[in-house]
Amino acid sequence: MLWGFALATVLAYALYLRLHGITWGLPYNYLNPDEATIVRESFHIAQGHVNPSWFLYPSLMFYLVAAVYLGIGLAWHPSFAHSFLSKGSFIVDASPYYLSARLVAVACGVVSVYLIYRLGREAFSRPAGMLAALFLAVVPLHVTYSHYAVTDVPATMFSLLALLLLVRAAKGGGRRALVWGAFAAGAATSTKYNLGMLLIPATIAGVYALRGAAASRKAHGAPAAHGTADLTDDDHGDRAAADAQDEATGGRHPLRALVRRCPLAFGLVRRVYLPMTLGFVAFTPFAVLDAPHFVSDFLRQNRIVARGWLGFEHTGNGYWYNLHVNLPGAMGIVLFAVSLGGLAWALHRRRRPDTMLVTYVVVYYLYVSSWTALQERYLLPILPILVLLASRLCVRLVRVRYVRRRVLAPLVTGLLVAGLLLPLSASIAYDRTLHGTDVRTVAKQWIETHIPRGSIIAAEPYGPPLVSRMAVYYFNAADHHQVYYRLVHLPLPLPGVKDKRHSIAFLRRKGVRYVIVSSEVYDRVLAAANVYPRQVGFYARLARHAKLVKAFAPGPGERGPTIEVYRVPQSLLSQGDVAHEPGGNG
């Protein structure tokens, strides 16, 4: 009863931290730019376009959010469903779509807290699981991304479900837990590709489970036949049928001969690799049905993370950067230090859950640290495991012999308090920022008042959400007056990618009269000037020759980047000026 009340309290507080400020910025995606992709693709699927035709992300999150959209529409009335899923409704007011998708992330975040409790209880002990749930409930990276309609927290939830089932199978839970654990690992991979690393703990669990079944069979007085020590009871039945067919065919079937020689490998294929593949394909079916498109986007995504992203040009060694910047920032320096101790303790203990979890954490960490894009969110799937290992170490220190306990108890208490309060304060501080006005909304209002309707505006990402000429039709149909512009998008600069749109020549070709730039872009460009000489030259010429008509910087109670609005004079767009423009893009 006491444990149940404690868990309910932890889950309730986890829900509170993740719901606070969940509507901030709507109807715009100010919280995270990737939300726009999730919401857009999910809406298209809900409209009936079941093939996403976009595979930089796998598809499970799209289908999950699309199911929520369909449920919202049908919960009222079919006529409302038709209106809710109309393109006009989506364009005119995207608030319900973003909010619904964010609530999916909130739910996945709270379920993750529950699953780490179950995983801790299954792998180590109930106190370890409860302490891990308490820590994960307040860890700032998990709290932050539980606000976002993106794939990271849902993928983490599915990975914890997979690990729970796989640990259960490794400890003698049977083949059903193994198969469903592998299937859940496939579902996690269908939410985020890098969760394919779950193949490692799934394989380890499969080895433990299959050998354990054979050992149990021997213990009950039914010794396995030669070459079948690693097969389960069902596998022995399959083997008997295969032997009968071999007699009829003269024993010449090559597949059955292979099964006899490699029973463990065959068991892993059947119980682990096939279910995991099915789990992936079930929720990203067009990886098979639209294979050329899928392969092209999948390879492109791998090139993106290998090449890097704006802002990570000078991070240096990824293994060290993640270790001394991303992980301490994600969970708090004290909790991170204790988690390293928990990792070392698990390496010393080497029980079945230890082997599975430590191998997964280490291999996953090495994999994502080899990328050039070192965003902290890529570490989110192993964050709950590190929290669990830290909790298990603290519980173990409390349970030492009485003489040592008198010395260790104050130390453990201090670690627990600091390990809890530091991430909790960071999470509360983040929630407190989710109020007030974003400066981009202020900039949007000023632009719509002072810049003539229909003007050609070139704008960078992270700028004010202006309405394009293509979208104004839907606002008019909804009897909603809206100022529109002819928008020209300046792409986000990326290392190694040629960009000719950040240039005066491009502005001249498009007839651009105004340019809007964002500090979210140009600050990172100027910090890596040697990598982006064209963009640096563009900003310099813009500042020197164009007129800065307005700048918007966040004031008290405001969020967002600094926005600068330039008016481009006709003289700057002449051929003579363009001829002196710097070329190349490093």
Image (cartoon, rainbow, N blue to C red):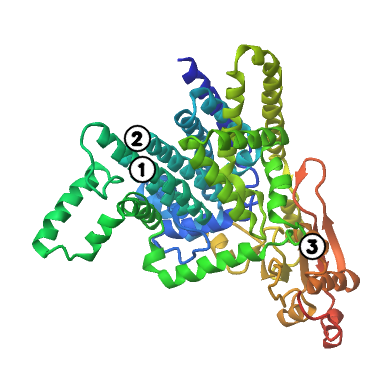
Q: CA distance from mark 2 to mark 3?
A: 55 Å
Few, some or many residues within 10 Å of mark 3 (<14, 14–19, 20+): some
- Amino acid, disc 1: Leu
Residue beneath the point at 31% across and 37% down: 215
- Amino acid, disc 3: Tyr
Which quadrant of the rendered structure holds the N terminus? top left
Residue 558 % position (x, y): 77, 44
Q: Earlier in the sequence, mark 2 or mark 1?
A: 2
Query: Could you tell me if the residues under marks 3 and 1 are in contact, i.e. CB atoms within 8 Å?
Result: no
Residue beneath the point at 67% across and 41% down: 330
Query: Could you tell me if the residues under marks 2 and 1 are in contact, i.e. CB atoms within 8 Å?
Result: yes
Residue 442 vertical position relative to residue 119 in the rendered view, above or below: below
Residue 203 % position (x, y): 42, 49
Mark toward the viewer: 2 or 3: 2
Residue beneath the point at 49% across and 29% down: 124
> Taking the image as drawn, is residue 252 in sight?
yes
User: Tag on residue 173?
Assistant: 2
Residue 8 % position (x, y): 50, 23
User: Tag on residue 178?
Assistant: 1
Q: CA distance from mark 2 to mark 1?
A: 8 Å
Q: CA distance from mark 3 to mark 1?
A: 50 Å
- Amino acid, disc 2: Gly
Residue 81 vertical position relative to residue 422 in the rendered view, above or below: below
Out of 277 and 266, give the one closest to the viewer: 266
Q: Residue furthest front?
A: 226
Out of 495 and 481, give the one closest to the viewer: 495
Which quadrant of the rendered structure holds the C terminus? bottom right
Few, some or many residues within 10 Å of mark 2 (<14, 14–19, 20+): some
Q: Earlier in the sequence, mark 3 or mark 1?
A: 1
